[in-house]
Image (cartoon, rainbow, N blue to C red):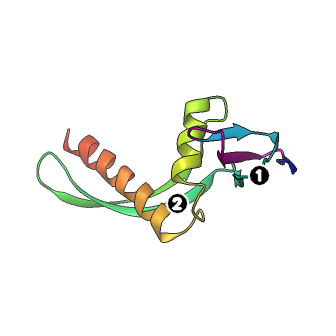
């Protein structure tokens, strides 16, 4: 089967004859392979990050982050395809993943 991705999409192909994951804009999908179409459009995530300053003063930081892959970086696209694309963009798993990364980085920055 021949598949073609739209302008803001990529095809993530796995299965027979592919070691990890293959990203293409158009490809023949052979028997034994599976293909998932994922969207590159950035998504907004809103959080309230609880952190503590270097002076040990707690604060709540309301934040909105826009998350999406760097289209010009193949490694970034691969990571996005593996971590985000198998799930709905606003599923609980994705929100927890993004929030955990952002909270960790915010706490490190706020403490310094």
State which mark lies toward you, 2 or 1: 1
Residue 52 percent coordinates (x, y): 19, 54
SS at mark 2 in the image = strand
Q: Name the residue under label 2.
A: 45
Above or below, 75 relative to 79: above
Residue 93 percent coordinates (x, y): 46, 65
Residue 19 among those drawn in magenta: yes
Which residue is pictured at 41% across the width and 63% down the height?
A: 96
What segment carries the magenta color? 7-20
In the displayed image of the protein, which residue is found farthest to the left? 56
Quadrant position of residue 54:
top left
Above or below, 25 relative to 56: above
Left or right: residue 71 versus residue 108 is: right
Q: Name the residue under label 1.
A: 31
Question: Which mark is first along the chain, 1 or 2?
Answer: 1
Quadrant position of residue 110:
top left
Image quarter hosting the C terminus? top left
> Marks 2/1: CA distance?
38 Å
Residue 16 percent coordinates (x, y): 66, 45
């Amino acid at each position: 089967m021949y598949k073609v991705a739209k302008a803001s999409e990529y095809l993530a192909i796995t299965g027979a004859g592919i070691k990890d994951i293959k990203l293409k804009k158009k490809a023949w999908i052979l028997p034994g392979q599976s293909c998932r179409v994922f969207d590159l459009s950035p998504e907004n995530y809103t959080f309230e990050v609880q952190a503590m300053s270097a002076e040990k003063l707690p604060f709540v930081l309301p934040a909105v982050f826009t998350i999406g892959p760097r289209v010009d970086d193949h490694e970034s696209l691969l990571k996005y395809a593996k971590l985000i694309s198998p799930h709905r963009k606003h599923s609980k798993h994705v929100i927890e993943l993004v929030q955990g990364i952002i909270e960790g980085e915010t706490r490190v920055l706020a403490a310094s």
